[in-house]
Image (tube, rainbow, N blue to C red):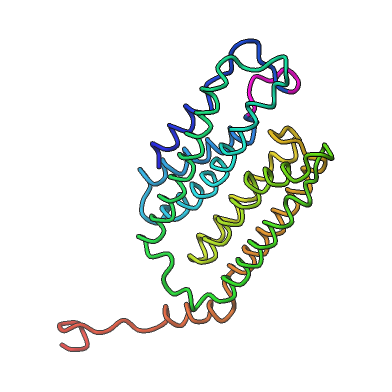
Amino acid sequence: MLACALVAVGAAAVPPTGGYSYGFHDRSVYDVSTVFLLSLLLVGGVTLLFADRAAHRVGAVLGLAAGGQLAGTGVVAFRRWHTSGGFTSAASNEALLRSLSVVLAVAGVTAGLVCVSVLHRDGAFRGIGRRRGMVIAGSIAAIGIVIAVPLAMGHVYGGERLMQAGAHALMYGVPWAVVLLVGALADRISAMAAALAVVASAFPLLDEVLMIPASRPSAGFVVAAIAACVVAIAALPTPHSRARVQTRSQRPAPRRPGDHHDR
């Protein structure tokens, strides 16, 4: 996963050449959201490499959130590099940049698969039947966020509504839905980490500097926050579960031969 993060950083860091300008003289189609996701993926990789086992699930969820969005970003960037500069300022190394966007997408997908494998190996998906409420909440949040995010964010150009909605779904809606659902299928700590990752990765939408223009980007943040809250609330311990944990902790320890009572 850390190797995927380093590959993704390298793929996104290559600048365009030949007098290319995007938007207000920006030098890349990748925005502040991409920088944040790359940082999040690096943090997740370092966590898996150096942290103790208790933090592995959190690192895996962070990596899944970042990897999914980077995968969608790479797919969208493959076309965006060709259209963003217009007819007069296309990058002279456009072929290389489009190839690197594919590398970015592959690195994101690979990192996401690694994270799911880590969660499965760690036993996070055991006992799903005992977490029906959390699974139902995660499923509802996932379906809702996939549908609502592209609609809420809106479009800028009337003739490109479908393409902009598809790009917003790839970059935001679908990755957020996947990480919320996986977190809900895993356990409480994974669900809480997924909710926090979604909210954190949605914050750049408030900046309104996006690879694909949107008329209401902040509305996407609101939808993401609502879906994350649904999963987070469902993941909170219930009074019944607290009582069960307390009962277990109050059970007397079994006596061993040779202790004071046996003597």
Q: Is residue 105 above or below residue 54?
A: above
Query: Is residue 190 left or right of 261 when viewed as pictured?
Result: right
Q: Is residue 5 above or below residue 117?
A: above
Q: Quadrant of the C terminus?
A: bottom left
Tell me where the magenta segment starts and ends, as one range. Answer: 23-29
* Residue found farthest to the right: 158
Residue 102, given in percent of the width and then of the height, sits at: 50, 34
Q: Quadrant of the N terminus?
A: top left
Residue 10, given in percent of the width and then of the height, sits at: 47, 27
Residue 147, given in percent of the width and then of the height, sits at: 71, 57
Q: Give residue 167's quadrant in the image.
A: top right
Name the one closer to the observer, 183 or 87.
Answer: 87
Q: Is residue 18 above or below residue 239?
A: above
Q: Is residue 26 magenta?
A: yes
Q: Give residue 20's quadrant in the image.
A: top right
* Residue found farthest to the bottom: 262
Residue at left offset 69%, top offset 45%: 168
SS majority, magenta? loop
Residue at left offset 56%, top offset 62%: 181
Q: Is residue 230 magenta?
A: no
Residue at left offset 55%, top offset 28%: 98
Residue 187, given in percent of the width and then of the height, sits at: 49, 66
Query: Is residue 237 left or right of 157 when viewed as pictured?
Result: left
Name the one closer to the observer, 90 or 239.
Answer: 90
Q: How many marks on residues?
A: 0
Name the one closer to the observer, 106 or 195.
Answer: 106
Residue at left offset 47%, top offset 45%: 109
Q: Give residue 258's quadrant in the image.
A: bottom left
